[in-house]
Image (tube, rainbow, N blue to C red):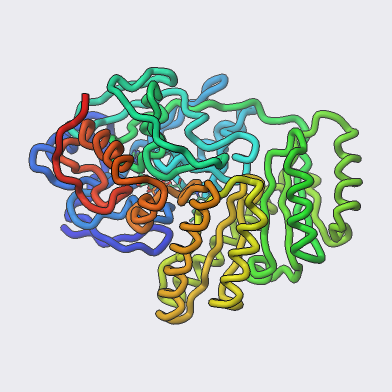
Amino acid sequence: MRIDYEDASGFKGWADQLWKPENESELAAILRQANAASTPVTIVGGLTGLTGGSVAKGGWAISTEKLAAIEIREGSAVCGPGARLADLQARARETGQFFAPDPTEWMASLGGAIATNASGSRSFRYGSTARHVLALRVALADGRVIEVRRGDPVDFALPALPLPQTTKNSAGYRLRPGMDWVDLFSGSEGTLGVITRAEVRLLPAPGELLTGVIFFPSDAQALEAVDLWRPVKGLRMLEYCDRGALHLIGEKHEAALLIEHELSSDDEFEQWQQRLESSGALLADSWIAASDADRERFRKFRHSMPESVHNRVRRNGFMKVGSDYAVPVEKNREMIRHYRAVMDQRLPGLYVIYGHIGDGHVHVNAMPETQAHFDLAQRTMWEFAEKAVRFGGTVSAEHGLGKRKAHLLRLMYSDAELDAMHSVKRRLDPNWILGPGTLFEARVPQAAIPG
Ligand SMILES: Cc1cc2nc3c(=O)[nH]c(=O)nc-3n(C[C@H](O)[C@H](O)[C@H](O)COP(=O)(O)OP(=O)(O)OC[C@H]3O[C@@H](n4cnc5c(N)ncnc54)[C@H](O)[C@@H]3O)c2cc1C
């Protein structure tokens, strides 16, 4: 029976059959059957993705929702791919530990977060999800299941593809000679295999945290503070919201920075007081957390930004149209200036900018009200992607490319480099059944596979 569904970006599709296996062997058997008949298979996690990767265009969909077990150990957690990040964090917290990656959307599944190499606010200090993966079990397209640990090298030759000069990157397979399987599967967006179990690192919860939402009287002062604060040791979050984003959620300020610092001495608290004063921050209006409840309130505040944008865009009948480009941090201010100049001219009042500014990675989101706005926003995002790549950046820092942004990969890679990615895909999935249309625009015909 045909099932229609969509992801969090509003990208719509359908599956001719939706499977919900209860264990790994059931999942592997479904894959074997699909492979024998060359039936396309799309893997569905929490459907919070923003690029259409989990949305099928026919064929079978396999949901991981019933594979959600979580086992907490000292220093790691072993989870089914369908485990929700909210549940993983809650279970880890009970043992005084935490999972460092924090993609703002906690309804994401762990399998989806690994498959997109998700990151988020704390990646400023802790990097993307891949860095925290210790081991994976993966069902390949033909139903074979392999178990790989961090450091187990891929057993065929790989070229070195150029990487962007950014701190995060989720655009395509990040191939390099001698890379390990964990890095190959992380960020491969369900196109190379299905993660059926993951062991991820847990860190001891930090002692004292200073968390703040700091408002500024001008955007320029906020951006100046970003460059001054970026090198602060122990700072694990440095997030930005512009005027439009703040106004959208009812905060009447010009700009805000969200910070979180793992404190190691009382002096550091005082240093922050000085920093805030000298940066021109609006001290009386800013919020500093005094409790975990405050911290949770700030987290929800940050989450409400993308959520409000998505809701508004969807209410107007459009899909999300936003950027996920990162640039080298030294290019960050120039890139933001460019974003703003272009958007003010083309879609004044119909866009917001927020995101992970510590990593040179902000999201520009358009809020189209007409089809003409939507088309213009799409074209503009393409131009922004070109510019980000010219600056040494990436066309996807954390969301992956899915189906909606697969065309952008050509901006970063030549035909020969894309061929190298296709070869890896063909080696692991010769019938090209997994995630067709995701990452690569179309099924690539069979060709000789280099040794
Ligand atoms: C409000 C909001 C805020 C967000 N903020 C952030 C943010 O700050 N940082 C960030 O990185 N992302 C963010 N996202 C995006 C999203 O949460 C991530 O892309 C998430 O990691 C996807 O997880 P999922 O379980 O929802 O996967 P899905 O959307 O279901 O799938 C995503 C991709 O992973 C593949 N996949 C899923 N499970 C598996 C598996 N077991 N094996 C192999 N492939 C699999 C799918 O086929 C698809 O290609 C945000 C989303 C929303 C709605």
Residue 10 falls in image quadrant? bottom left
The location of residue 444, given as percent across then percent down, is 19, 46
Residue shown at 57% from the left, 49% from the top: 327
In front of the other: 451 or 6: 451
The location of residue 401, given as percent across then percent down, is 39, 51
The location of residue 362, given as percent across then percent down, is 59, 55
In front of the other: 40 or 291: 40
Residue 26 visible somewhere in the drawing: no
**Relative to residue 332, is residue 56 drawn left or right?**
left
Residue 137 falls in image quadrant? top left
**Relative to residue 339, is residue 376 drawn left or right?**
left
Residue shown at 75% from the left, 71% from the top: 252
Q: Quadrant of the N terminus?
A: bottom left
The location of residue 276, given as percent across then percent down, is 86, 51
Q: Is residue 378 above or below residue 223?
A: below
Q: Is residue 160 above or below residue 412?
A: above
Residue shown at 38% from the left, 32% from the top: 175
In front of the other: 119 or 47: 119
